[in-house]
Image: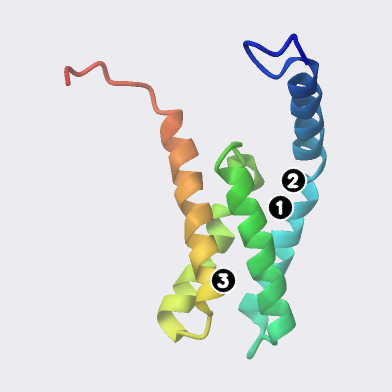
Amino acid sequence: MGDIPGGLGTFGDSLGDSCHLQVTELPPGLGDSCHLQVTELLQAESPDEEDIYGLAATLRRLSALFSEHDLTPWGLFGPLSQLLRRALDTGDVPAQVTIPAISCLFFHVFWELSRVPDSGASR
């Protein structure tokens, strides 16, 4: 452990590698799961607690990933916008789903704005 003065050394390198592997392997299934769960919730007349809990858990995971990785190619903006529209129109989407959905939409907009070129205007 004497070679750690400026950083984590090989431990930090291996930790970063394992985190990268998990991020590159996990998200595609998570995005598909989110699409499916949102579609099912939107089509259900009265979703059960299990469906709500599952979607809330998926959205929390996505929000955590979205905060660090650009997931905009997964096309989650449309389905999540529809979900929030239903929440506003009917009030039957609980906060445990709407709050992480808003967070995901925020990060989607954030990543889209990060690609907008700077206009060069003085600040």
Q: Nearer the viewer, mark 3 or mark 1?
A: 3
Residue placed under numbered mark 1 in the picture: 31
**Residue 1 versus residue 94: which sits nearer the camera?**
1
Q: Amino acid at mark 1?
A: Gly
Write the residue at 46% across / 28% down: 115
Q: Position of residue 77 (x, y in %)?
A: 54, 54
Return the mark for residue 27: 2
Residue placed under numbered mark 3 in the picture: 97
In the image, farthest residue toward the left = 122
Q: Amino acid at mark 3?
A: Val
Tell me whether circle 2 and circle 1 mark residues in contact (CB < 8 Å).
Answer: yes
Quadrant assignment, res 6: top right
Write the residue at 82% across / 39% down: 25
User: How far is mark 2 from mark 1, CA to CA?
Assistant: 6 Å
Write the residue at 54% across / 57% down: 78
Residue 68, compared with residue 49, is above or below; it is: above
